[in-house]
Every structure is written in structure tokens, then in C-alpha cells.
Amino acid sequence: MARLIGRVTLFIKSIRGGDFLFWKVFDSLEDWFLVLSLGTMMVLNFANVVSRYLLSTSIAFTEELTTNLFVWSCFIGAAAAAKRGAHLGFSLIVDNMPSRAQRIVTAMVTLLTLAMFALLFIMSLDMIETQIMLKQETPALGMPEWVVSMGISVGALFCFIRFAQAGWNSWNKGGRQ
């Protein structure tokens, strides 16, 4: 029993962030992916605009690649924003509640958010399975469609982890953000 309690305690510490190497790498992965993907999108769009004006022709794959990177960036960016507590929230009513009620509302909001991201993760895996089975490809690049859709699964997983951390931190602060 003591071993189980020790593992649960270790898991809870890891959810909070702790000093584990995994969380340091995980934190930097989000940030570096966003830097690289947004930089790539910018370069591709600039090259396409220059090509249109100077060569009177468009680079065919840039629009598709930019859109696909945008899907990934939206979900990873949502997780990075959750990590920083940057999502908007209306807390006027909750701030005026007693501490116990704040904790209950925080727990409910966190659980609903986690349920939504868990459902999104499960449904995106189903979508990916269908895309693999049907061998769907993107129109311009001929890339497997499931590669793009993986952005939804990976992003939902990252968001789940980040909102679990935020909920835990808020719970420890008595329900305050």
C-alpha cells in the first residue's frame, strides 16, 4: 500500500511540473515547435507572395503546408497558453464566492475541460483510423491526411495535460486562478 501511495504522490508531483527533466523537455517542446512552425509559415507565405508578384505564378504546396502547420500550431499554442494561464476567463462571480465554493467550481470546470479534451482526443483517433483505412491524401503534396489530423490528437493530449496542471495549481490555491 505504501508503494502505491508513493507512486500516486510521484504522479501528482509530476503533474504539477516539479523539477523532472521530462517536464523541462515538454515545456521547451511546445515553445520550440511554435517558433519553428510559425517561422516556417511566415517564410512560405512570403515566398509565395514574392513568387506571385515577380514570377506571376504561385508555389502550389505552400497554401496546403501553411494550413496544415496552422492546425498543429493552434492546438499546441492552446496548450502553451494554458501552461502560462493565458486563456481568458470570467471570474467575477467565482471571485466573490466563499473559498470552499471556489474550489468546487474550479474542480467542476477543470473536470469538464478535461472531459472535453479527452473526448476530442478519442474522436480524433477515430478520425485518424478512418483516414488511414481509406488511404486519404492531401491534394497538393499527396501527404497522408492522418499526419495533419495528428495535430488534433497531439494538441488535445497536450491541452489535457496543461489544463490538468492548471486545475491542480488552482485547487492548491483555494480555487483562485
Image (cartoon, rainbow, N blue to C red):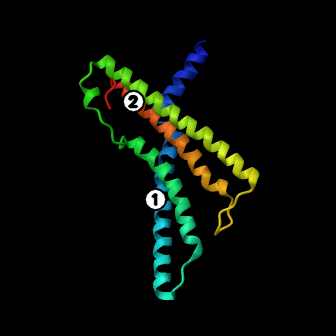
- Residue 156 visible from this viewpoint: yes
Residue under the image location 51 percent in, 50 percent down? 29
Residue 34: where, in percent of width, then height?
47, 56
| Placement of the C terminus among the 4 image quadrants | top left
Residue 129 as seen in the image, left or right of residue 8: right
- Residue 17 visible from this viewpoint: no
Q: Is residue 176 above or below residue 38?
A: above
Disc number placed over residue 169 in the picture, else none? 2
- Residue identified by numbered label 1: 35
- Pointer 2: residues within 10 angstroms few (<14), some, or many (20+)? some
Residue 169: where, in percent of width, then height?
39, 30
- Foreground residue among 6 and 94: 94
Q: Residue furthest top?
A: 1
Residue under the image location 49 percent in, 49 percent down? 76
Residue 148: where, in percent of width, then height?
61, 56
Residue type (three-letter) at the residue carrying disc 2: Asn
